[in-house]
Amino acid sequence: MNIALLGYGRMGKTIEDIAEKRGHKIVLKVSDDIENHDLSESNIDVAIDFSIPNAAFKNITTCFKNNIPVVSGTTGWLDDYEKARKICKDENSAFIYASNFSLGVNVFFELNQKLAGMMQGLEDYSVEIEEIHHIQKLDSPSGTAITLAQQILQENSKLKGWQLEDADEDEIPIHAKREENVPGTHTVTYDSSIDKIEITHTAKSRQGFALGAVVAAEYLKGKSGIFTMKDVLSDLFQN
Ligand SMILES: NC(=O)C1=CN([C@@H]2O[C@H](COP(=O)(O)OP(=O)(O)OC[C@H]3O[C@@H](n4cnc5c(N)ncnc54)[C@H](O)[C@@H]3O)[C@@H](O)[C@H]2O)C=CC1
Ligand SMILES: O=C(O)C1=N[C@H](C(=O)O)C[C@H](O)C1
């Protein structure tokens, strides 16, 4: 498969390594305005976007307009997500976005949803989310923390939203910490005066994110439509 990398930073380089080991070819690397590149030249099967919040929407939709399927893991641009979906549909293109591509985090998402459903009636417990990332991270809170909060909100109608730090009683507080060299750690805590329930996912490197993105690209090749990691991993998850 011929892959274009939109963003060639920490994730772009890790994806290159894993994609080549799986027999794919990186035919284009973009680190600046996508308009500076001729997308028709390289016979691109799929583009993988791990760039920066300000560039993601333009990168993704330019690919749709050139009939190139996109896997995107860039976080911090999701105010434009619905617009991107519409352009994908209008152009009959293909798209997978995930705030986190690692298999482990996608298992963690399933657990979080199930736990939120079990806890929603237990009013003695308050819920909060903590995420810890490296100090270079541009966005806060992490996309993964936002997904975790959205899942809890889906299950618990008494909670109205999430908030960084100073949350009201009916909001989920998200604590975002920045520490040297942390690839990504997420914890969901339910606390009461009697006890505490915590679930944590700790990434040990960026390998899991990158492998998930390449597997998603392999899934997307030749398809049209909008998919999620649930679709990609559906055969692996047994209920
Ligand atoms: N969904 C997931 O599983 C994961 C998502 N991420 C997200 O991926 C993004 C990238 O993360 P990192 O690689 O750690 O960041 P990074 O800062 O190492 O790399 C971003 C790269 O984008 C380049 N860039 C700047 N303008 C660009 C443009 N217009 N088009 C394309 N590239 C451009 C920069 O030069 C830089 O090399 C972040 O939003 C991060 O939150 C990171 C890890 C996992
Ligand atoms: O910026 C990162 O590094 C990461 N970003 C993603 C996020 O915002 O959730 C995923 C992962 O935690 C690493």
Image (cartoon, helix red, strand yellow):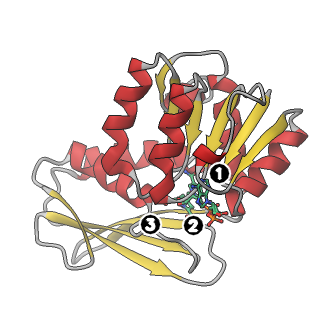
Q: CA distance from mark 3 to mark 1?
A: 18 Å
Quarter-wise, where is residue 222 in the image? top right
Mark 2 nearby-residue class (10 Å; few <14, some 14–19, many ≥20)? many
Q: Disc 2 residue type?
A: Gly
Circle 3 sits on which residue? Answer: 187
Q: Disc 3 residue type?
A: Thr
Label 1 or label 2, whichever comes before in sequence order: 2
Whether disc 2's CB lies below 8 Å from ligand 2 is answered yes
Secondary structure of the residue carrying tag 3 is: strand
Q: CA distance from mark 1 to mark 2?
A: 10 Å
- Of the numbered discs in the image, which one, if any, rests on residue 209? 1
Q: Tell me if residue 99 can be seen.
A: no
Q: Residue 218 in the image: state x and y as whole percent.
A: 71, 27
Whether disc 3's CB lies below 8 Å from ligand 2 is answered no
Q: Tell me if residue 65 can be seen.
A: yes
Quarter-wise, where is residue 211 in the image? top right
Q: Residue 36 in the image: state x and y as whole percent.
A: 64, 47
Q: CA distance from mark 2 to mark 3?
A: 10 Å
Circle 2 sits on which residue? Answer: 184
Secondary structure of the residue carrying tag 2 is: loop
Whether disc 1's CB lies below 8 Å from ligand 1 is answered yes
Q: Residue at x 77, y 42 (%)?
A: 28
The N terminus sits in image quarter: top right
Left/right of residue 141 with respect to residue 93 in the rendered view: left
Along the line of sight, the residue nearer the viewer: 104 or 228: 228
* Residue extending furthest toward the bottom: 180
Secondary structure of the residue carrying tag 1 is: helix
Question: Where does ligand 1 appear, by image quarter?
Answer: bottom right
